[in-house]
Image (tube, rainbow, N blue to C red):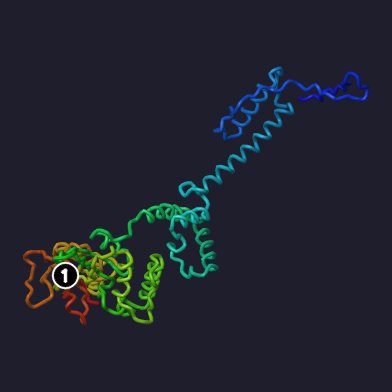
Amino acid sequence: MATTPEVELIFEPGCADCARREAALPAPLPPLGDDFDWLVRDYDGFRLFMLEQLAARFSERQRWAPADLEVVMVEALAVALDQLSDMLDRVFAEAFLATARQPASVRRLLGMIGYDAVQEAGFTGLDDPAVRREKSAELEALWRREPRLMEQARRAGPRAIHRQERMVTVADYAERLRDHPLVERASATSTWTGSWSTLTVAALLQHNILLDDVLSAAAVGGAAAFVRLQADVEAFHRSKGLVLPSWALAPTPRTLLWPYLERYRMVGQPVELVDAVLAGIQLSISIRVAPNYFQSEVRRAVLEALGTGVGGFFEPGRLDFGQDLYASDIIQTLAALPGVETVCLNRFQRVGAHQRDQLDAGRIELRGLEVAVLENRPARPARGYLRLTLQGGQRG
C-alpha cells in the first residue's frame, strides 16, 4: 500500500559540484485524533475498529475482502488483543477480594486486611516460616477442592476487620468475653461507687468451672477434652496477640481471662471479674415406661436429656443469667423421649433445706447472675441432683 518515493538530484546554480537530493513524499495523512473506544474489550470490537480505521485512511479503496492480506492481519491482531484483554481482566480481578478467583490471591488479600486465613482454619505451629508455607499450600489446595470454604473466608475477613473489639460499652464487655473459648455465657453490669463506675463482669465457663479452679483434665471432662481446650485457648490467644498460657504452671481461668480483659478494656475503667452464681436445682421425677422398652434404656435417655453434655437441658451455656426455670419445659423434654408414657414431677425446687418446693407455681425464679445448674454428681450436691423413679416397662 506504500510506494517508494522518487529521489531527485538538484544542482545549485553556479556550482557544478554542488547538489542535493530531494524525495517527493506523499502528503501527510490528516490527524484523526484519539477516537479509540477504550471500552472495546473483545475480538469483534477490535476487528471492527481496525477495519474502520483502514477504510477511513484509505478512502480511495472501495473493497475489502476477507482474503486480503490487510484483513487477515487485522483479524490476527484482533485475536491477540482479545487474549491480552482477557488476561488483563483476569489479572485485574485478582487484585480485589470481591473478584479474586485464585485461592492464593484470596489468602494474600485477606492477609493484607489483617485476616490470617491459615490460622483461622485451625493450623498450628505457624511461627515457623517453613510450616506456614506448608500449611498455606494445604489451605489453598483445600479451597480448590471445596470452593465454599474459600467463599466463607472471603466473607469472614471483612467482617473481622470491621468488628469492634475494644470494650467501650457495658455490652461490649460481655460480648467480647464470650469470644474466649473458656466462656459459655457472660454478663456485665455497671455500678456507681460514688466517685466512679465499676464494671462487674460475670462469666459462666465450660463444665461450670469456677474462675479460681485449676484447669485440668478432670475439670473439663477427660484428657481428650483438655487437649482440645488447650489448642482452642492457644489459637485464640495467638490471634489476639496475647501471651500463650503455660500449662505446666496449672493456670486458672482467671489468669487466662484477665490479660484478655486488660488488653481491650478502656483505660481507667475498673473491672471486676466474678463467677456466675450457680443455683443448684433439686428434681424428683417418676416416669412410667412403655411395655416394650427396658427401664435401663429410658433411664439412660432421661439422664442424657437432663444432663450437662452436648444437647442436654442443663448443658453449660444453654440457660442464661437470671433465666427462670419452668417445670413445663422439663416435662416436655422428657415426654418427647422414646419409651416414656407419662411423666410426674414430684419435687421442683432449689437445693437447700430452707428452699420451698415450687411445684405448684411451676417456676423457679432466678435473678441477676444466677444460672440454674443440675450436675447430678454425688460429690457436689450443692450443684443440683436428680431422683428418678421408673415404673413399668421391662427390667434390665
Left or right of 245, for residue 58? right
- Residue 374 or residue 67, whichever sits in front: 67
Percent position of residue 196, x then y = 18, 64
Residue 84 image position (x, y, % from top left): 62, 41
The quarter of the image holding the C terminus is: bottom left
Q: Could you say whether the residue bearing mark 1 is in a helix, strand or loop?
A: strand
* Residue drawn at (30%, 71%) of the image: 258
Which residue, given by chain and number where applicable, does mark 1 sit on?
287
Say what amino acid the circle numbered 1 marks: Ile
Observer able to see residue 287: yes
Q: Report whether residue 342 is seen.
A: no
**Among all residues in the image, which is located at the extreme front?**
14
> Does residue 350 sit above or below 143 in this rendering?
below
Tell me what residue is drawn at x 54 percent, y 61 percent: 137
| Residue drawn where x is 31% and y is 68% of the image | 262
Q: In the rendered view, does 354 fall on the left or right side of 41?
A: left
Where does residue 167 sit, x and y in percent of width and height? 29, 61
**Mark 1 crowdedness (10 Å alpha carbons): few <14, some 14-19, many ≥20:** many
